[in-house]
Image: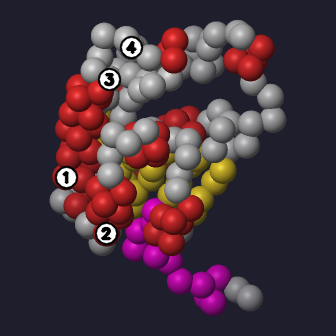
Amino acid sequence: MTFEDYEQKESVVIVYTGEGKGKTSAGIGLMARALGNRWNVAFIQFIKHWGVGEHVFVRDIQALFEDSLYFYKGGKGFYKAGELSEQHITEAQHKQAALETYTEALRCASGGEYDVVICDEINNALHDGLLTDKQFEDLFKKRAPGTSLCVTGRNFPDKFLKYADIATDMTKIKHHFDNKFLANKGIDF
């Protein structure tokens, strides 16, 4: 076979999921590649409302890419994650934040303004019941024809694999958290 035997899709759906590290990092890498090709990118982040390295990075490069990069930080932190959860945030507040973030993601994915829309940690929001299956499916079905969509986070449901063109499962082999070590700034967040 030669390259002439292949076609190129106008846009794709990419999934980064699994228990291992690297899902958000892969999304950031995709963002860098798309911006490097002078594409318009929307990076929509569910869950991570606290200060993480990618927030500083995106803030700093936004000036360089001007209108080509849109960043939306939503969510209220870990939901039902024991000691990692923010205890003062109610279930209703978590759901409202997820809905607002989802609404922004759907707007970006369906509007045709962006070449790539990255929904970081949206899989977690679905798994935790903060979003419905219908909302999640609508994100795939209603995206603009020329807009590629990337969804990240643990627990991507197999029933939605039919929408994916590329799916990567980040497999954890070993992580120091399992030995009761906290995440390292600059490495884990």
Q: Secondary structure at mark 1?
A: helix
Q: Position of residue 104 (x, y in %)?
A: 21, 44
State the mark number for residue 141. Answer: 2
State the mark number for residue 76. Answer: 3
Residue at 38% of width from left, 22% of height from top? 77
Classify residue 94 by image quadrant: top left
State the mark number for residue 176. Answer: none
Q: For marks 1 and 2, give the one nearer the viewer.
A: 2
Q: Does the magenta-highlighted stretch encompass residue 8?
A: yes
Q: Amino acid at mark 1?
A: Arg
Residue 100 in sight from this viewpoint: yes
Neighbours of disc 1 within 10 Å: few (<14), some (14-19), many (20+) = some
Residue at 58% of width from left, 15% of height from top? 186
Neighbours of disc 2 within 10 Å: few (<14), some (14-19), many (20+) = few
> Where is mark 4, residue-wise?
86
Q: Is residue 181 above or below residue 90?
A: above
State the mark number for residue 107. Answer: 1
The magenta stretch is 3-13
